[in-house]
Amino acid sequence: MAKTRTEEVLTEEIEKMVGSEEFQDQKGEFRNFTHRYAERSGRSENEGWALMKKKVIEILPAYISDGMIVCSLEKIAEKEPCRKAMEKGEEQLVISPGKGFPAVKFPTFYPYLDFILRAGPVDICHMKTKFKVEGNLSLGNVTLKFQGKRITRIFGSATVDAKIFICKGEIPVTLHEFRKEIPLDTSR
């Protein structure tokens, strides 16, 4: 499946995250999987670690993109300009920078990745890694399409301020934070 433009932009941030010292410090969290991979494949644990990072880069941007947009839509719909447009029965609302549309703090969400090592039909090792994502979304030049009392499409651009954590134990560990302009289009 082709990546959306939003996922492509977020992939750049995830690549920075997996290359960071903070992510490298989490290597022990993945050791059970990388060790089993090395045992079963005859390759090194470092090759297993590289495979893990590759999978994080391939999969996590889509989860973060979807999570940010889905979680933000509900909050965007609650803002006064949207409520007024829906009450008037308007079919769309165009938002421009400087129009006073407030930033939206999207609800914290927890995407996770399942890593499964298989030998034929048998699962040798299964590891679930949970992340935490929190932040704000500031709409730039955006058009919101309505159908009745709900947003059916949003397209344009937004600036996202986000933090990504890895959940381990009681306290999530910060892996990466960024501020980036992202394209939005929920029409896929």
Image (spheres, rainbow, N blue to C red):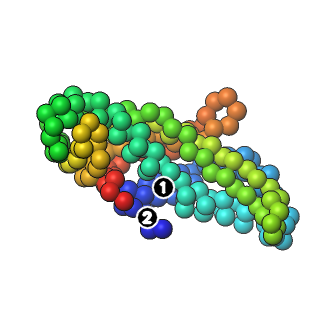
Whether residue 36 appears in this view of the structure is: no
Q: Position of residue 186 (x, y in %)?
A: 34, 53
Residues 18 and 70: in front is: 70
Residue furthest out toward the front: 148
Q: Compare marks 1 and 2 and give the one earlier in the sequence.
A: 2
Mark 1: secondary structure = helix
User: Residue 1 location in percent, x, y?
Assistant: 48, 68
Q: For the C terminus, give its image quadrant.
A: bottom left
Instruction: Locate residue 107 relative to residue 154 in the image: left or right.
Output: right
Outermost right residue:
39
Q: Secondary structure at mark 2?
A: loop
68 displayed left or right of 23 = left
Report the residue at 81% width, 70% height from top: 120
Q: 138 or 72, which lies in front?
A: 72
Q: Which residue is mark 1?
A: 62
| Quadrant housing residue 144 | top left
Asked whether the beta carbons under mark 1 and mark 2 sit within 8 Å of each other, the answer is: yes
Dot label at residue 188: none
Please provide percent x and percent y for residue 106.
Answer: 40, 35
Q: Is residue 133 above or below residue 65?
A: above
Q: Residue at x 29, y 39 (%)?
A: 150
Q: Amino acid at mark 1?
A: Ala
The crowding category of the residue bearing disc 2, from other C-alpha atoms within 10 Å (few below 14, some 14 to 19, many at least 20), is: few
Q: Residues within 10 Å of mark 1 (few under 14, many from 20)?
A: some
Instruction: Work out how far the residue at label 1 is from the one at label 2, CA to CA, in angstroms.
Output: 8 Å
Q: In the image shown, does 63 or 55 lie closer to the viewer?
A: 63
The residue where tag 2 is placed is 3
